Amino acid sequence: MTTKQSGSPALPPEAVLVRQLRERPSALTRKMSLSTAMERLAEVSEDGVGFSDGNWRNIETGRKIAQDWELVLIALVVGATPSQLEEVGRDSAASLLRQEIDKRAQVELAATRFDLNDIPQETKQKLLRQLAEIDRLPGATEQDRVQMREVLFNQLNALLDMHAATLKLRSR
């Protein structure tokens, strides 16, 4: 496949996503170099390696279509979500990523001293109240309620991302 303007091959959508996430410039995040990505790949890989930097480059430049397991590892490194993988047509990899996130969350929570009882009652109550308000909203369809829950959880995720960024800034 070629682009109309340049005549050069169009990149696979997942290659574009990976590069955008690795190179995302923002006020709180610097571009992730390939060497940093490879270090993080080794950290998230069960074998402590993952795959070569040449393989990553080939995936990111579209010379190679990533296998699902490779895309899952890359997603863990660059922070791609299952929804983003679905948006680029990689449903199978998205499903594997969901499974991997659930597995890692169970392991991490079991390994820490974190307990759901550690969450302050007030915080739990506020979350439950918000969810109940969404459920009781007159005239809202189930699709409306799903979207409102998604917005609520996206806001919570944004808050956690800000907290993580603050911790990074303090550790410098």
Image (cartoon, grey):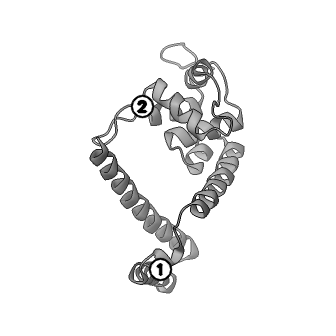
Around disc 2, counting alpha carbons within 10 Å, would you say few (fewer than 14), some (14 to 19), or many (20 or more)? some
Left of 25 or right of it: where is 139? Answer: right
Left of 32 or right of it: where is 107? Answer: right
Query: For the point 70% across and 37% down, which residue is it?
Result: 68
Q: Determine whether the residue tagged by mark 1 lies in a helix, strand or loop.
A: helix
Q: Between marks 1 and 2, how big is the CA–CA gap? A: 38 Å
Q: From the image, which quarter does the N terminus lie in?
A: top right
Of 55 and 13, which appears nearest the observer?
A: 55
Above or below, 22 relative to 57: below
Which residue position is annotated with label 2? 32
Of 123 and 47, which appears nearest the observer?
A: 47
Query: For the point 63% across and 34% down, which residue is it?
Result: 48
Q: Determine whether the residue tagged by mark 2 lies in a helix, strand or loop.
A: loop
Residue 169 image point, x, y percent: 28, 45
Left of 103 or right of it: where is 23? Answer: left
Mark 1 / mark 2, whichever is N-terminal: 2
Q: Amino acid at mark 2?
A: Met
Residue 8 image point, x, y percent: 54, 14
